[in-house]
Amino acid sequence: MSFAHSSFIEGARLPSVRPSGDSVRSVVLDSWRRSRSSGVDPDGFGGAVGMAGLDLQRYRATHPTALIRPVVRKLLVEDAADAGLLVAISDARGRLLWVEGDSKVKDRVAGMNFVEGADWSEDRVGTNAPGTALALDHHVQIFGAEHFSRAAHAFSCTAAPVHDPSSGKVIGAIDITGGPRVAAPEVLALIRATVVAAESELRLQLLGVPTVPDPTTARLQVLGPGRPALTVAGERIRLSQRHAEILVLLAAHPEGLSADHLSMLLDESELDPVTVRAEMSRVRKILGANGLASRPYRLLMDLDTDLAEVRRALGRGDAAAAMRAYPGPLLPRSLAPGIIELRAEVHGRLRASLLSTGDPRLLARWTSCVDGRDDIAAWTAYLGSMDRNSSVYAQVEAQLALLDRKLGI
């Protein structure tokens, strides 16, 4: 197959398509031709990572494949890590939304940009299981040198598209990537069974049938004056401030943090690496052995946070939802530089959103909380949003005058 690939790339004549030693399957040859027509570089290193960080988190949170991810994790991901495999979920355009499984394999495929947020559509990367499955709207297996990109020749993959049961439209693809064992027929059968289960889950969701929540999803509460807490599989764990700081920073940096970078975000004077490693060891005990990776430190599990909930609401322009989800500042007693920056960012975005709405109810809530009680601009906007004949108008006007005197304006 390597010879056939080289012959095709170099423009030599291919052997006829037939089931023999170094022949090319028709599905692969057709894909190679499309890849070449699209101008794909066979010596490239995968699709560009066009979406990362918060943009990727927001996109995934609202994408319909988020509804099937618990099913995929249960049927595939839990066993993939032990089998030395990866499971990926893409959107309908071929962008990888989740890549999970064996951490060592995940590090290897990162070298060819098979990472979350990267575009692995066929017209961008060439022949590959998720991209070609989407191009054909059909399940497919791609073995080693059948990949158009030479960087992917060390891997085999099996993928199938997932459809919206109400419209029939493709919403994404499910893929298994790994060594030669992925080429086995039973892997294709497993992928197809998982797709059936995923589409059934989508159908239930559309009908409004309640489903069991994913027990692997964790929830972190770090906003407001209360003690930070982590809820995993229904169990609520109270956290120290340092551990909460670490989890917030890891959630905000899904690409991972080196020990040095993490120490800078946690302390102005930069913590000793031994101290960082000790804290990360304790965090790993909280999350479980499969919850945290190192080099760089990064989360291997879904960790939703109340901070992320506020950001999602702000991202879609819903100031009311953002205010409902905001009980107070992020870890208000924390002096960690990374936390201070995040705290200021969400405070500034929320304040700007509230001021732009001019909604008196939202402004009333803001000016009554710790963040807004001395906010002259918010009180002024609140006053401007009210009817002069309102019984509260005089009270707000008096409070604004008091703030003027207090702040020497």
Image (tube, grey):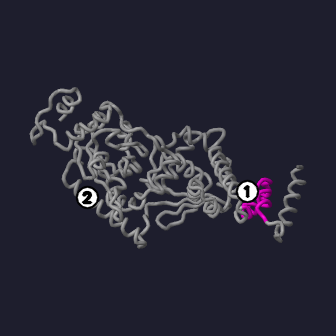
Residue 331 visible in the displayed image? no
Horizontally, residue 56 falls left or right of residue 79, namely right
Residue 4: percent from left, percent from top = 17, 33
Answer with mark 1 or mark 2, whichever residue precedes in sequence: 2
Q: Which mark is residue 371?
A: 1
Residue 9: percent from left, percent from top = 23, 29
Horizontally, residue 311 falls left or right of residue 65, namely right
> Residue visible at 34% across and 55% down?
170
Question: Residue 168 occupies which quadrant of the picture?
Answer: bottom left
Q: Which residues are magenta?
A: 363-386
* Crowd band around label 2 with a 10 angstrom C-alpha radius: few (<14), some (14–19), many (20+): some
> Residue visible at 60% across and 62% down?
321
Q: Dot 1: what SS?
A: loop
Report the amino acid beneath label 2: Arg
Q: Nearer the viewer, residue 9 or 76?
A: 9
Our reading of the magenta stretch's main secondary structure is helix
Q: How many marks?
A: 2
Distance from the alpha carbon under mark 1 to that under mark 2: 52 Å
Report the amino acid beneath label 1: Asp
In magenta stretch: residue 378: yes
Q: Nearer the viewer, residue 254 or 158?
A: 158
In magenta stretch: residue 104: no
Question: Residue 379 occupies which quadrant of the picture?
Answer: bottom right
Q: Nearer the viewer, residue 275 or 397?
A: 397
Residue 220 visible in the displayed image? yes
Asked if residue 277 is positioned above or below residue 232 in the image, the reply reads above
* Crowd band around label 1 with a 10 angstrom C-alpha radius: few (<14), some (14–19), many (20+): few
> Residue visible at 75% across and 57% down?
372
Residue 271: percent from left, percent from top = 61, 41
Q: Dot 2: what SS?
A: helix
Q: Which mark is residue 192?
A: 2
